[in-house]
Image (spheres, coloured by chain):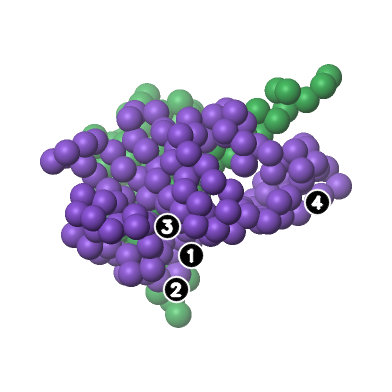
Amino acid sequence: MSGERRVDEVFSALSDPTRRAVIRSLSEEGPSTVTELAARLPVTRQAVTKHLEALEEAGLVASDARGRGARFRLTPRPMTEAMRWMADVGGEWDDRLEALRRHLVRRRPP
Amino acid sequence: MGFGDVGNPWVAYDEPVSDERVTRSVVLPAEPDEVWATLTTPEELSAWLGEVVALELEPGGSLVVRENEGATRRGVVEAADPGRILSFRWRRLAGAGISLEVGGASRVTFVLEADPAGTRLTVTEEPVPLATAGFGA
């Protein structure tokens, strides 16, 4: 049961495109501080902190310390292929549906 | 189905087919018929999905969409109920020859429902096992 809840938490944590970007960045660049992540991503330090909290709660990232110097890393528990698939495919549909919405709005008579 | 075909068994579908499924639901500012057109006509699809190379709107009909970065989605239509439901199986192919990458097969289903603000469009995508993927032929 708790395993199931954990999976739900993981999916919900990964449903946000910025959080997926944080995961990607940690996986590409290795353990990073909030400041480093904020420099790489188009979001503020505050937003990075908030997203890291959600990812930490879902067990996807962990930090070695608290405070400004804390470095966050991906946990050894890797995302399963299924989770990765869901994160990728979910991201694709987010992008496509946004493009579809813009397309419909653009051609709508004023 | 011939060798080299996208449906070949050497393309192992190595992921467990479980309850993994992606669902997105949005309300679009257009009538269901208009949204249906954006899902089923090549000119409209090119505005948000990709360049449509083939699209036969009937069960068993083929679907080929070219995405950017040289990848192609190749699929088979399963159901097309105008203004209501569209579903197909598809998979992603990238590269060519020895570097051809073939993604796992999945089923995409669009459900359209009238909404006071226009149309609620719900899309789901879920993996389908290779045995039932039924590509090629």
Q: Which residue is mark 1?
A: A8
> Do marks 3 and 2 both belong to one polypeptide chain?
no
Are the residues under badges 4 and 1 in a single subunit? no
What colour is chain A?
green
Task: Tell me which amino acid carries mark 1.
Answer: Asp
In the picture, which chain is purple?
B
* Quarter residue B37 falls in: top right
Which residue type does callout 4 highlight?
Ala
Return the residue at label 2: A4
Circle 1 sits in a helix, a strand or a loop, which is it?
helix
* Amino acid type, mark 2: Glu
Chain bearing tag 3 is B
Is the residue at mark 2 from the same chain as the one at mark 4? Answer: no
Q: Which residue is mark 4?
A: B114
Which residue is nearer to you in this view: B46 or A102?
B46
Q: Earlier in the sequence, mark 3 or mark 4?
A: 3
Q: Is disc 2 in contact with disc 4, using a CB cutoff of under 8 Å?
A: no
Position of A43 compared to A72: left or right?
right
